[in-house]
Amino acid sequence: MSANLARKSLKIEIAAKKLPACFTVFDIVYCDNKEIIDLPLMERKKLLFDTVSETPRMALSRHIESNGVDFFNLAKRQGLEGIVAKRRDSKYYFGKRTKDWVKMKALLDDDFVVCGYFFKGGK
């Protein structure tokens, strides 16, 4: 192992202890060697919770079925990026966006007016 690689490995180890990463599982697309993307979301969620165990480094994404606006506002107050609203009966599509899943971002934005500009170099 090179000295540079050893230093990087040590830095990664120190960072992992200080700020450990956690993987969050949102969905399940295969179960018992079968593709299950055609099952409704809520059936996949049940299979996910029946199949995968949480650990200190792996969490299962929870869902709420009501008070979506309140949930979005809570995410916004906590400085999170936003939420995703999903239809209960939605299927999973690889590499395709549908209207069944809607990402609602809690972004700061503003309107600006561009009045004019000048080309550099006198042109």
Image (spheres, rainbow, N blue to C red):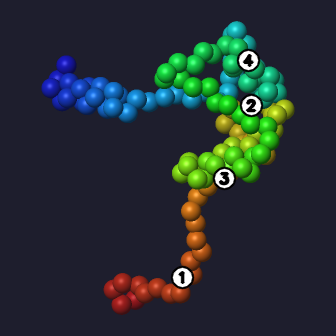
Amino acid, disc 4: Leu
Side of 118 where 110 appears, left or right? right
Q: Residue at horizontal 60%, vertical 15%?
A: 53
Which residue was labeled with disc 3? 73
> For the residue carrying disc 4, how many other residues have a C-alpha within 10 Å: few (<14), some (14-19), or many (20+)?
some
Mark 3 vs mark 4: in front: 3
Estimate the spatial distance between the alpha carbons at disc 3 and disc 2, rounded to whole Å.
Answer: 27 Å
Amino acid, disc 1: Val
Residue 69 appears at what percent x and percent y? 74, 51
Mark 1 vs mark 4: in front: 4
Secondary structure beneath dot 2 equals loop
Estimate the spatial distance between the alpha carbons at disc 1 and disc 3, rounded to whole Å.
Answer: 31 Å
Which residue was labeled with disc 2? 92
> For the residue carrying disc 3, how many other residues have a C-alpha within 10 Å: few (<14), some (14-19), or many (20+)?
some
The numbered mark at residue 37 is none
Name of the residue lying farthest toward the left: 3
Estimate the spatial distance between the alpha carbons at disc 3 and disc 4, rounded to whole Å.
Answer: 29 Å
Mark 1 vs mark 3: in front: 3
Secondary structure beneath dot 3 equals helix
User: Could you tell which of marks 1 and 3 lies nearer the N-terminus?
Assistant: 3
Which residue was labeled with disc 1? 114
The numbered mark at residue 47 is 4
Vertically, is 76 above or below 40? below
Q: Residue at horizontal 74%, vertical 31%?
A: 92
Name of the residue lying farthest toward the bottom: 122
Mark 4 vs mark 2: in front: 4
